[in-house]
Amino acid sequence: MKRCSHCRAKFAPRFANAQLCPTCTQQRDQVFELYEQFEDGMALLRAALADAEVENNELRSALADTKYELVDAEEDVSLLRGALNNTEDDLITLRFALAEANKQIAALRQSLLDAQEDASLLRDALADAEDEVLLLRDANAEDIIPPDVLKLLIRLCHPDKHGNSSAANRATTWLLRQRN
Ligand SMILES: [Zn+2]
C-alpha cells in the first residue's frame, strides 16, 4: 500500500511509480484535460485576436484612406467653389462691360443720326448756295454786254463824234474798261 501524495489516503498502486490515489489521479487527469481544453481555447482566442488585429489594421488603413479621400474631396469642393466665384465675378464684369458697350453703341448711333442730319442740312445749304451761284451767274450774264454790242456802243460814243464832250469821254472810258 502507498499513501497518496495529495490527499494522504492509502491506496493500492497499479504502477510502481504511482504517487496519487485513483481518485486524485482521476482528478489530476481531469485537470490536465481541462488545462488542455483551456490551452486550445486560448490558442483559438489568440488566433481570433490576431485575425481581429489584422482586420482592425485593415479597417484603420481603410479609414485613413477614406480620410485622405475626404480631404481631397474637400479640397476639390473648395477649388470648385473658388472657380465658381471667379466665374460669377467674370460674368458680372462682362455684364457691366456689355452694358457700357451698349451705351456707347447707342451714343454712336445718336451721333451718326446727328451727323446724317447735319449732312442733310449742309446738302440743302449747298443746293441753296448752288442755286444762288446759278442766279448770280445768270445776273452777271445779263450785266455783260455782248462784244459786238460793246464795239457798236464804243463807236457810237466816240468823243470825236460828240465834240469831245466830257460825257462822251466818260462813257467811252467806261465802255473801254468793259472790254476786259
Ligand atoms: Zn488521493
Image (spheres, rainbow, N blue to C red):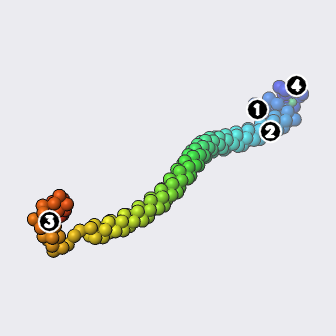
* Cβ–Cβ under 8 Å for marks 3 and 2: no
Residue type indicated by callout 4: Arg
Marks 3/2: CA distance? 182 Å
Instruction: Identify the disc placed on residue 16.
Output: 1
Task: From the top left corner, tell me how far across and down residue 121 is, in percent.
Answer: 44, 62
* Cβ–Cβ under 8 Å for marks 4 and 1: no
Element under disc 2: helix
In the displayed structure, 162 sits above or below 23; it is: below
* Cβ–Cβ under 8 Å for marks 3 and 1: no
* Cβ–Cβ under 8 Å for marks 2 and 4: no
The earlier-in-sequence mark between 4 and 1 is 4
Residue type indicated by callout 3: His
Residue in the foreground of this view, choosing between 24 and 83: 83
Q: Residues within 10 Å of mark 1 (few under 14, many from 20)?
A: few
Most extreme residue toward the right is: 9
The earlier-in-sequence mark between 2 and 4 is 4
Task: From the top left corner, tell me how far across and down residue 26 is, in percent.
Answer: 84, 37
Element under disc 1: loop
Which mark lies nearer to you, 4 or 1? 4
Residue in the foreground of this view, choosing between 103 and 12: 103
For mark 3, what is the residue?
Answer: 162
The earlier-in-sequence mark between 3 and 1 is 1
Marks 3/4: CA distance? 203 Å
